[in-house]
Amino acid sequence: AQTVTQSQPEMSVQEAETVTLSCTYDTSESDYYLFWYKQPPSRQMILVIRQEAYKQQNATENRFSVNFQKAAKSFSLKISDSQLGDAAMYFCAYRSVDQGAQKLVFGQGTRLTINP
Amino acid sequence: NAGVMQNPRHLVRRRGQEARLRCSPMKGHSHVYWYRQLPEEGLKFMVYLQKENIIDESGMPKERFSAEFPKEGPSILRIQQVVRGDSAAYFCASSPRTANTEAFFGQGTRLTVV
């Protein structure tokens, strides 16, 4: 079974600075998807960024980028120019490409605080 | 196009009562997933349904919990004889018929058992 581990329960960063959130995972599959979700106090789960394992290029979405190290099974999220609105819980998630296995496996989450 | 709609947002039940949580997927989505989030934890998969079929219920507790996604109407997650340990946020997500796409989440139902 796949597992996802986020080893940083809490992180904080100064506004406008850069922060990196860590995520490692364990799988025996060669192809899969990885995601970062943001959960603000409203509880809404918001997709931040998605990476397909067969793509070597790291995904980027505006101020958000990932460092995907497939051999190391590492998938970190970098947030540049941090803004107050980035404060939230961040969850790393794994999903198989198997058509019958659509479930997401989530890490425990990292609470990100932005200091003004 | 409305997002995934869950209701109620908050639900309070006494121990032993039944809880019914509803999820209306996005228009055109025929795949529904239910997740449970305990306080200060990540989401845990419970069940994956397509219209009128349960595809994967490997995360569902064996007793008291059931889910359905009828041909017409919302998906329902039903918890019978609730206990304090059932208190959690329950999230529904949906995805289109082509399964290898993102699932979109609802805002969740926070169940409190008193």
Image (cartoon, coloured by chain):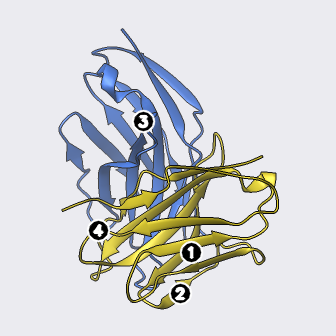
Q: Report the residue marked by disc 1.
A: B47
Q: Report the residue marked by disc 4.
A: B26
Mark whose residue sits in front, 2 or 4: 4
Labels 3 and 4 positioned on one and the same chain: no
Q: Report the residue marked by disc 2.
A: B54
Are the two marked residues, 1 and 2, in contact with CB atoms closer than 8 angstroms?
yes
Chain for numbered disc 4: B
Q: What element carries label 3?
A: loop
Q: Given the image, on which type of amino acid does mark 4 rest?
A: Met
Residue at 49% from the left image edge and 91% from the top image edge: B53
**Quarter of the view holding residue A83:** top left
Residue at 51% from the left image edge and 25% from the top image edge: A11
Chain for numbered disc 2: B
Q: Whole-Å distance between the Cαs marked 2 and 4?
A: 19 Å
Q: Is mark 2 on a helix, strand or loop?
A: strand
Residue A71 seen in this snapshot = no
Chain B: colour as depicted:
yellow
User: x, y (%) of residue B102?
Assistant: 31, 65
Q: What element carries label 4?
A: loop
Chain for numbered disc 1: B
Which of these two is toward me, B100 or A39? A39
Q: Whole-Å distance between the Cαs marked 3 and 1?
A: 24 Å
First along the sequence among labels 1 and 2:
1
First along the sequence among labels 4 and 1:
4
Are the two marked residues, 2 and 3, in contact with CB atoms closer than 8 angstroms?
no
